[in-house]
Amino acid sequence: MWAIWTARNKLLHEGQHSTASETMNLFKRYLGEVDGAKEKLVVCKVPLVCWKMPKEHFVKINFDARFCKQNNKSCSRIIIRDDSGLVLWSKTIMHVNIHSPFAAEAMACFQAAEMGLQLGFLRVEIEGDSLAVIRKLNEERVE
């Protein structure tokens, strides 16, 4: 279709006449370029991360945070699901005076734990994607 449209425009705007054979050759070259591009195309497969249900009779609290360096603001997102995946509660919280991505994630983690306590959940799994916060929480403290 593109080759026919190009031939038409050349005739109308430039006065150049193309034969059907020339238009067909243009079309074939174009298809050859497309096929060549397909062969050169590199496909990267990213593993799909799926939410995993908590153990039976537990709830899972997922948290995440976003940080804006320009204005030292962050946003926490918290979602609580039961062992069948049903959303029991969710919330987005905006923060000011947050000075690093680590502080934003730590705040979100704290709020996730706090929400679980306030809502009275006794069997809880808390999950976030900040490796730094998780490592810090898992450190053994020696006093």
Image (cartoon, rainbow, N blue to C red):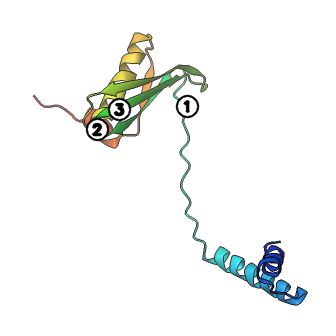
111 or 101, which is in the foreground?
Answer: 101
Q: Position of residue 56 (x, y in %)?
A: 55, 23
What residue is drawn where x is 27% and y is 31%? 98
Relative side of 37 to 106, left or right: right
Picture quadrant where residue 78 is located? top left
Question: The C terminus is located in which quarter?
Answer: top left
138 or 9, which is in the foreground?
Answer: 9
The CA distance from mark 1 to mark 3 is: 27 Å
- Categorize mark 2 by other alpha carbons within 10 Å: few (<14), some (14-19), many (20+): some
| Nearer to us: label 2 or label 3 | 3
| Callout 1 touching callout 2 (CB < 8 Å) | no
Residue type indicated by callout 2: Phe
The CA distance from mark 1 to mark 2 is: 26 Å
- Categorize mark 1 by other alpha carbons within 10 Å: few (<14), some (14-19), many (20+): some
Question: Mark 1 or mark 3: which comes first in sequence?
Answer: 1
Q: Where is residue 130 in the image (x, y as percent from the top left)?
A: 36, 40
Residue type indicated by callout 1: Met
What residue is drawn where x is 32% and y is 32%? 73
According to the picture, the residue beneath numbered tag 1 turns out to be 53
According to the picture, the residue beneath numbered tag 3 turns out to be 74
The CA distance from mark 2 to mark 3 is: 11 Å
Relative side of 8 to 51, left or right: right
Task: Identify the mark at residue 102; answer none if there is no mark.
Answer: 2
Circle 3: element type: strand
Question: Mark 1 or mark 2: which comes first in sequence?
Answer: 1
**Given the current orientation, which residue lies at the most extreme right position?**
20
